[in-house]
Every structure is written in structure tokens, then in C-alpha cells.
Amino acid sequence: MKTPSMIEAKKRTKNKVNILYNEYNITDDMKIGTNKTYHIKTYGCQMNEHDSEVIRAMLEDMGYTNNDTMEKADVIILNTCAIRENAHNKVFGMLGRIKHLREERPNIITCLCGCMAQEEIVVNEIKTKMKWVDLVFGTHNIHRFPILLNEVAKNKEQEIEVYSKEGDIIENLPYIRDNKYKSWINIMYGCDKFCTYCIVPYTRGKQRSRKHEDIILEVNNLIKDGVLEVTLLGQNVNAYGKDLYDDYRMENLLEDVAKTGIKRIKFVTSHPWDFTDNMIEIINKYDNILPFIHLPVQSGSNNILKLMGRRYTKESYLTLFNKMREGIKNISITTDIIVGFPNETDEDFEETLDLYNKCKFDLAYTFIYSPRVGTPAAKMKDNITEDEKKERLERLNKLVSKYALESNKKLLNKKVSVLIEGYSEKGNDMLMGYTDTNKLINVKGDKKNIGKIVNVKVTDAKTWSLNGEIID
Ligand code: SAH
Ligand code: SF4
Ligand code: F3S
């Protein structure tokens, strides 16, 4: 048994990160999944989505097949998120449901992984009160999952293996993409920014960039497999390379990925601190780097930004924002905002609204601050009432909808480029896809266009989506 410690997770060492290429191997005695099924529930960010694709591939290599119905699956995996309290609550609620299921089907194997598995308090609770959870593994040892699952299936005893700290970078793990035409690519792991509210630097370890050669190889393989769009993933992608190279940075990586000829490139998430002018130049230079940037601001008040440890001011954010708006044609910019951070006064919140009115973001993800055990902000006095927090969120969300609609309306009757992914939930043979500015669009047109990038005329603009017709 190996359980995590937040104090260890917080430490940053200069230990060399090795890159291992041959760690993954499924031997015949690990193929225990024949005639058995699995069901994965994924919570949290794109990084978790992609980790679930890896876990899926491992299970299928072991002989298991996917089961859309959790109630009927032999192995249930909860890939969890620790970012806010409500993410926690959802998982504990689900664990309650699975406990009931086990009363009828005692042979179900229940696994919990992802960011909650890295939290000391969560693991302690599972260890002491939830003996029926069979396997807990963390974000640093996903590659060990098949071995651990095999052990649990044989021994029928609770197994917990969570490393507090990051280890090596494991290359060549398999994954099964959820989407035929789009793929996630991790370009780096971890985060060293330590924003005072955030648990990610503890659950994902120190920043570790993958080698650019390995990333490019992956892109080239995806192109051969028919992939049209890649999203380069990291908590803080603009800092790519800083931990690994003297002079190879995100702008170099973006350029090298663009040169592979892949049709569309996106990247998330950008931290304003590391965004360089050269990046703007590169985004402009290559048509296949999409004009879409997610640039979380978190707050419009300098007092709060300072307490959050974000390393920029409202003014410097606005300068960067304006450079992007002016420098990149048709750019769409989205953001994240937290309301109700400790000590946020009415004036501070008004500053956030003011910044929002200046930026008129294409979209924003807005959150009520949630204290995370072990982070510096959790020690600050949470001195804003629930009602105030909710009221601020509501006021902010009104602006979010207003400007989302406004920015969509600007596209009315315009021609936009869309990757058609499949049928729309709207039915009536409607298709769906995303524009090059990352806007969801429901499209009228022939199904032969699925899997193609086509030009679409926008016929209707709503707050959260567009409608259109394929023109060529
Ligand atoms: N690496 C990204 C964000 C990762 S988390 C970045 O730096 O921008 C995604 C979003 O969750 C954050 O941008 C923030 O808005 C929100 N978030 C993170 N911790 C939070 C907390 N403790 N309470 C509420 N929202 C939080
Ligand atoms: Fe969290 Fe800040 Fe790192 Fe983003 S940059 S993951 S908000 S610590
Ligand atoms: Fe959640 Fe972990 Fe992502 S905390 S947001 S799943 S990095």
C-alpha cells in the first residue's frame, strides 16, 4: 500500500525526469478481461478525458470490452477531479450508488483514480471507511493500472498505490480516441504556478515537458490515422520547454506542429504570464493554428489577483488581451473566472465586471470559489456569504450570456470553416461540428461531409451555439 502526502506533493525537487519508452507491456497472464466488460466515468478537465482514453486502451488490451451501462459492467472506473467541492461530492455520490450495486453483484471491481486519488484526505477516507473500493491509483502511475488490476482480481483485497510525487515521463502508452477526427496530445504534465486556490500543482506534480520529437512523432502518426485536429494539452502550455530546453519554447513547438501539415491545431490552457509576442506571430503565420485562445483571467481586481498569486495585473492582462485581439485575425478569446475568493469586496467584484465589459469574451467558465485542503487560500478566512457568492455568479453569468450572444451574432451570414464531426443531437439529420474559433454549430448538409472541413454559412446565432448550411 502506498498513500499520498500533501506535504510531499508540495515539494519541488531538481531530480532529473527520465523519459521511458518501454514501460508498457501486457503479458498473456494479464489478459483477464475476456468476456468481461468495463465502464469508465470521467470527471474534470481534458487531461482526465485523455487519461481515460489511455485507461480504456489498457483495459481493451487486457481483453475487456466497453459497457455503456455501469450497472452491468464487471469493472467500474471513476477517473476523478479535485478542483472544486462539487466535483468531490459527485464522486462520493457515485461511490454510494456503486456500493448498492455490489450488494447484488459482489464481484464488481471498483477503481478510483485521477486527482482525488492524489488527495490525502480522500485516500484516508477510502482506506478507513470504504473497504469495498477495490483499487485506488494516482495520476503518476497510470501505466501501472493493468498490473494493479490483475493483482486486485487475484487477491480480492483493497489495493492503494498512489505516489505523492511525479516520477518519470512514460511514453508510448496506448489510447483509444473518443473522437475519430480529433485528438488530445499531452505536451507537458504538472504545474509549478501554485496559484493560491488551486490543487493541481499537488495532484499533478511538477512541470515536465515531453520531448518535442516525441510530440511531433505522435502528430504524424495521428495524421496517418486520419486525424484532422489536435489539441495540445497542458495546465500551462505557454511554459512548454522551460523545464527541459535552453531555447526551445511553445512558439517553436507550435511552428513544428504546424509544419506537419495537420489540418487544425488548438492548445489549452494558456497562462497570461508566459504568453509571448512571438507566439502571436506564429499563430498568424500558420493557417492551421486556429484563431482561438483560452486565457483565464480569474479576477479583474488587482487586490484579488495578488491574493490568488496570479503574477499579473488587470492592466497587463488587458494589454496582452488587446494585442491578441488586434494581432490575430478573427480571434476568439475565452476565459475562466472565480467569484467569491476570500476578501473579495463589492468593489473588487465590480472590477471583474468592468474587465468583462472591456474584453467582451466569446465565452467564459465561471466558478464560485471552493476552498481546497492544503492550499494557501484555504487558510484565508472565507468571509463572503453563500448568498453573496451566488448573487455575484448570477450577475457575472448575465454578462457571459450577453457577450456570448453578441459575438455569435457577429458571425451571422458569414462564411465559417467547420470540422463536421457527426450527427447533431438536434436530430432531423442535422450535422454538428466546431468552427475554427471553437464555436459549436449545427449544420444542414449531406452526411458525406462527416469527417471533412467545410465552409458553412451561418444562418442563426444563439447564445451557446450557431446554426448553418454547408456551402462548399
Ligand atoms: N491551468 C489552468 C486552469 C486549471 S483549473 C489555468 O491556470 O488557467 C480550471 C479552472 O478552475 C481555473 O481556471 C479556475 O478558474 C477554476 N478553479 C481552480 N481552482 C478553483 C477553486 N479552488 N475554486 C473555484 N474554482 C477553481
Ligand atoms: Fe492551477 Fe494556477 Fe497551475 Fe492553472 S496555473 S493549474 S490555476 S496553479
Ligand atoms: Fe480536475 Fe485534476 Fe483536471 S483537479 S481539472 S482533473 S488536473
Image (cartoon, rainbow, N blue to C red):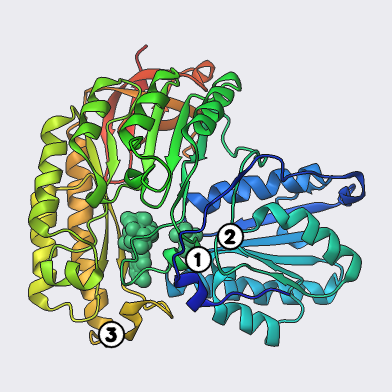
> Sequence order check: which comes first, mark 1 or mark 3?
1
- Residue 280 vs residue 286: left or right? left
- Residue 323 vs residue 362: left or right? left
Where does ligand 1 appear, by image quarter?
A: bottom left
| Mark carried by residue 380 | 3
| Residue occupied by mark 1 | 203
Residue 255, given in percent of the width and then of the height, sits at: 35, 25
Name the secondary structure under disc 3.
loop
Residue 76, given in percent of the width and then of the height, sits at: 73, 61
Name the secondary structure under disc 1.
helix
Residue at the (34%, 30%) spot, across then down: 252
> Residue 438: in sight, yes or no?
no
Q: Is residue 87 above or below residue 232?
A: below
Location of the C terminus by quadrant is: top left
- Please name whichever residue, 234 or 393, is drawn nearer the observer in this view of the structure: 234
| Mark carried by residue 139 | 2
